[in-house]
Amino acid sequence: MVTGTQHVAILLATYNGTRHLAEQLDSIVAQTHTDWTIHASDDGSTDATLALLLTYRERLGAERMVLWQGPSAGYSRNFMSMLHREGVTGDYVAFSDQDDIWDAHKLETALLALAAVPPDKPALYGGRSRLIDEAGRPFGLSPLFGRRPSFANALVQSLAGGNTMLLNRRARDLMCRAPASARVVSHDWWAYLVVSGAGGRVVYDREPTLGYRQHADNIIGSNAGLGARLRRMADMVGGRHREWNEANVALLSNMRDALGDDERARFDHFARGRATWLLPRLWHFACAGLYRQTAIGNAGLLLAAALGRL
């Protein structure tokens, strides 16, 4: 068991989640690491989600289950709003979706992975997921990424799902350099960007610690399979990533002081490359050392770079 100052604020974003929410809450209650508080931010549910949350608050107590009203502006804004709330306190924060099932050792495993990181250094744990169907039956795994986590990767790719992540206080502080009202493309990508950009510790766990439910109501589904990888490649070449990168670059520009020296140089090359013509663009991107985690992803990256779609 992990000891010391290890209180985890679990940030649970909910919206019309009655169907699977109880399973997720029960899996949190069953954690081997027991020093936690659930902060549930509901984004305007019209089903019985709030009633279910109130039932669990009565069962767990108001000190272990805190309810918030979300901004009703999408999942990423909901998670970012919780990071900014003064009433959300903890040595670590963990993001939670409303329809997953956590393994009992999920928090303990993540805390052990970050235990040796000094508190003044940003740290992020994330990893693979076990894919489960509507009934909770496993049927596969999310992609295994073999290349090392880094800012050069984070500039063009998110590494792990937010539902797998645990961050220390310093990482949370860095994420909050983006205002609560800012356009953050995805909270998990932003976490990877700021922690790797500040020279922090990023731990990628190859062993899944949760069941990631796949169903028709998923806002963002799994990245597993050749079809999903080809769709991501099409998104990149089609220009969708350029729009996302525009938002990321704007936010990172406002916190260049928090970036390490090497990371600041990479960021500057990336930003300049996006704003110039073909040959200098490719030179700047090469200097930034950009890479994605798969061969298909890197093929799409090269094509998008040549077409000016980054």
Image: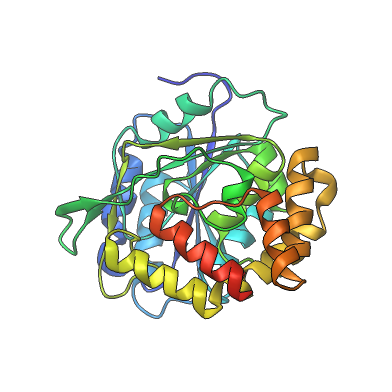
Residue 72 place in picture, x, y as percent:
56, 76
300 above or below 8?
A: below
Q: Quadrant of the C terminus?
A: bottom right
Query: Is residue 178 visible in this depiction of the protein?
Result: no
Residue drawn at 31 percent across, 52 percent down: 142
Is 18 placed left or right of 179 in the picture?
A: left
Q: Quadrant of the N terminus?
A: top left
Residue drawn at 53 percent across, 40 percent down: 149
173 above or below 79?
A: above
Residue 231 place in picture, x, y as percent:
37, 72
255 above or below 123?
A: below
Query: Is residue 84 visible in this depiction of the protein?
Result: yes
Residue drawn at 44 percent across, 46 percent down: 61
Is 14 placed left or right of 25 in the picture?
A: right
Residue drawn at 45 percent across, 21 percent down: 2
Q: Which of the pair 118/73 is nearer the observer?
A: 118
Q: Which of the pair 212/147 is nearer the observer?
A: 147
Is 69 placed left or right of 17 in the picture?
A: right
> By what rule are the colours in the image chosen?
rainbow
Q: Quadrant of residue 296?
A: bottom left
Residue 115 place in picture, x, y as percent:
54, 22
Q: Quadrant of residue 269?
A: bottom right
